[in-house]
Image: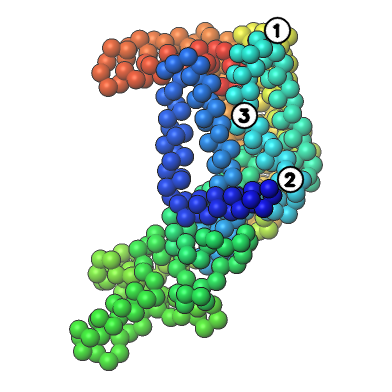
Amino acid sequence: MVSSLGSALASYENLILSSSTRVSSIESSLRSLTWFLPGRFQDSEVASEALYTLLNILGIYHDSIVLRTVSVLPAPLRPPSSSHARYTRHYTTSSPTYAALARSLTILGYTELLLEMGIKKRLGKDKAEKAVIAIEGLKAILRLAIMKTTEGRTSVQPPIAEREFDPSVLDLHKPHIVGQPPNAKVSFARTGETPRSAADVLLGREGEGERDRVAGAAAEELGQEEVQQEYWKGSRTGYARPTIASIRGAGEAPLGDPTAMMGANGGKDSVKEFLLTRVLTVEDVKRPQDLVNKAKGLKKLAEVIWILRPLLYVLAMRKWGRRHTLPYLLSLALEYLAFSLRRSSTQRLSLGKASGPMLPNSPSEVEKAETKKRARAFWWYLVRGPVWESWTKPQLERIAGRFEDKPLIGFVSTLIHDYTPLVDDYYFYTS
């Protein structure tokens, strides 16, 4: 039983790796489809959300397969990782506790709306409100546990690494990765191929065999015994690299030439552009765990307020009602307080005497991106509480009425009419 299950999982993983581009396209198409299902038939919103939840959970599994496979590729062949991916992948691989907490929080975030819908339809509104409080309480516990596991570092969204590269990168080395055991190092000795990086595909460069063919054809056509080397091959790694001469001449290279680099001006500009793509930034040389600073003082207080804010909001709504002004103002005040404390503490540390781009007090790109996400979250208050009832909803209904009889753009009116009742009925649509 166990062996057959393991064999089935291995076959499924090989299928994902061999058809990664196609699987990604299917996932994207089905996710887009779920936006147009509500209102089409009875309980269509539940079916749409169930499909969307299933796709997201499957996406987590597919991403883990792809990321695990990419991680065993030789370093020059791996697609570049963002700072967020490096940070979350470090804790996911080095801390089983963080991995369990982060995946649980992510899955709960994907299933929360479906749970609210199912409980409300089966057990009624009162049970659904209690379920919402339980879910927000569990999310707060998970976030606080993650904060403790990371030694007081602030939360990042999402807490696990996402796929950030074109799945077609895997097609470069499909014969070497499909059918291999998990975490097995990729070897090119069996086929004798020269490894090709993701940049080779993005820049339209061919492999070493193709370069040899082009060079041989040029030598035969020109009657030359020797052709200037346009690449060199490392004796230790076997990786082919372009020479400076080929980069300088890239501006005059014919269209589709494998040595043509990103710079189209040739000469020094081409060399400069090529070298800039190899420059290491401050984020690249930091340890993954140092990409998010440990929260202390006001910043730690801001993080705790941000974590507890949703729970306090639903508790206030349970007492005074969802449309009451007090829960709305309480939530807005807490979120603004947390955001202000976070931003002011970060700015004060970054402007301190002992701060600099290489020093621990300087905010990283991960923290800056997280701060921007939390700033954008304030737009959700336009579709919550009394503001939604008294201003946003009437405005959308007016727009829907204006476009209702218009050809081609009438679907805007249909979408507004379909989603307005869902925003009215379900908390997690705008949480």
- Residue at the spot 31% in from the left edge and 18% down from the top edge: 410
Q: Position of residue 168 (x, y in %)?
A: 43, 55
On the image, numbered disc 3 is attached to which residue? 111
> Element type at marker 2?
helix
Give whichever of discs 2 and 1 has the lower sequence position: 2
> Element type at marker 1?
helix
On the image, numbered disc 2 is attached to which residue? 98
How busy is the neighbourhood of tag 2: few (under 14 within 10 Å), some, or many (20 plus)?
A: many
Instruction: Please tell me in which quadrant of the rendered image residue 139 appears.
Output: top right
Q: CA distance from mark 1 to mark 3?
A: 26 Å
- Residue at the spot 30% in from the left edge and 80% down from the top edge: 215
On the image, numbered disc 1 is attached to which residue? 320
Looking at the rendered structure, the kind of residue marked 2 is Tyr
**Considering depth in this image, is 247 or 165 the residue closer to the camera?**
165
- Residue at the spot 51% in from the left edge and 16% down from the top edge: 43
Q: If the image is split into quadrants, where does the C terminus sit?
A: top right
